Image (spheres, rainbow, N blue to C red):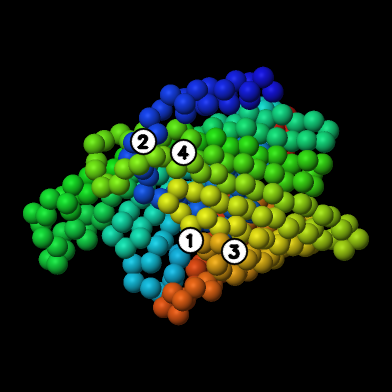
């Protein structure tokens, strides 16, 4: 616990000593995921190594499918436990929205404390982000090749961010998480986005409850993920997740309220060490008539550290 407190104190000092009137970020990439309650590692560095195994995750999200230039996002993630308390992770994200591209690289570390009733981890992530316009689109015959604004945005803007996360489960029933993204943010170049101002505070709160019904081989897990993020519509995802057949099958519903007014479903399956999850969302906003909804897919591969070590000992 002392180590966690020291970590928090250091971060607070860094934030207070950082100039918060620098160039603001263009958006927060953590706001797009609808499977964050299934894979908290997508948004919370505190989840790093939480399951005491090693996991590879590939996530793809296509927002506003079929609409020209619709956002598409690829995320590749690894996290694993080292020893009883330390977790490490790495993540790579590539996002494109029309001609606007975002690249993010992240490494994370977590420290966990486990008791008979509570399992909690605090995590820290170091992130490099780059925003730029597509070089391919900029070379189009429809674009003036000597346009100063376009040439400036080809180099884009680069940021170094520090984010903090806390994730825990109480009695294997109550689920809680807090993410403070871009708690410390520093621009690495002199790019002028044309927007300056106070740095916005952001947070993601994750609360859930896991209810097991052994007689029916069923797990019921309602949860809420509230997202208050920089230059991203504030919204809350209300989730209901059901797990069947020794938790090998997953079904669920999600209703988002606030800036994102949408409804969707989730389906998933776990076979041995492999997992596949698919979710589909439709919006209640007027723009829905111009697209085919949003799709999100995740593939996971898990290496059970405990089982592997037991096999080696034999």
Specify the label residue 277 is tagged with: none
* Image point (72%, 51%), residue name: 208
Distance between the alpha carbons at the discs numbered 1 and 4: 22 Å
Q: Position of residue 17 (x, y in %)?
A: 43, 24
Q: Nearer the viewer, mark 4 or mark 2?
A: 2
N-terminal of the pair, mark 2 or mark 3, is 2
Q: Which residue is under mark 4?
A: 182
Distance between the alpha carbons at the discs numbered 4 and 2: 14 Å
N-terminal of the pair, mark 1 or mark 3, is 1
* Image point (31%, 56%), residue name: 100
Asked whether 154 or 255 is in front, the reply is: 255
* Image point (58%, 33%), residue name: 123
Tell me the SS state at disc 4. strand
Asked whether 184 or 96 is in front, the reply is: 184
How many neighbours does mark 3 have within 10 angstroms: few (below 14), some (14-19), or many (20 or more)? many
Q: Could you tell me if residue 69 is visible in this image?
A: yes
Q: Which residue is under mark 2?
A: 21
């Amino acid at each position: 616990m002392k180590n966690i407190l020291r970590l928090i104190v250091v971060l607070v000092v860094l934030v207070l000593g950082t100039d918060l009137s620098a160039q603001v970020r263009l958006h927060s990439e953590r706001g797009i995921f609808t499977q964050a309650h299934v894979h908290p590692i997508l948004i919370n560095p505190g989840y790093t190594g939480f399951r005491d195994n090693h996991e590879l995750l590939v996530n793809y999200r296509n927002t506003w499918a079929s609409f020209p230039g619709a956002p598409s996002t690829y995320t590749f993630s690894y996290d694993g436990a080292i020893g009883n308390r330390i977790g490490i992770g790495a993540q790579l994200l590539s996002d494109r929205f029309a001609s606007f591209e975002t690249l993010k690289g992240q490494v994370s570390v977590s420290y966990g404390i486990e008791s008979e009733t509570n399992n909690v981890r605090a995590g820290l992530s170091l992130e490099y982000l780059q925003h730029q316009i597509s070089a391919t689109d900029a070379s189009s015959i429809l674009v003036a090749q000597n346009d100063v604004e376009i040439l400036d945005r080809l180099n884009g803007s680069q940021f170094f961010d520090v984010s903090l996360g806390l994730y825990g489960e109480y009695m294997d029933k109550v689920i809680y998480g807090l993410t403070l993204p871009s708690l410390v943010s520093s621009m690495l170049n002199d790019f002028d986005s044309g927007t300056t101002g106070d740095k916005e505070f952001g947070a993601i709160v994750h609360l859930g409850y896991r209810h097991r019904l052994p007689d029916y081989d069923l797990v019921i897990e309602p949860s809420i993920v509230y997202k208050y993020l920089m230059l991203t519509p504030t919204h809350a995802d209300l989730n209901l997740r059901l797990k069947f057949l020794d938790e090998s099958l997953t079904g669920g519903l999600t209703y988002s309220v606030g800036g994102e007014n949408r409804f969707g479903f989730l389906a998933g399956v776990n076979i041995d060490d492999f997992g596949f999850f698919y979710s589909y969302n439709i919006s209640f906003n007027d723009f829905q008539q111009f697209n085919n909804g949003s799709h999100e897919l995740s593939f996971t591969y898990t290496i059970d550290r405990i089982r592997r070590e037991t096999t080696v000992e034999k």
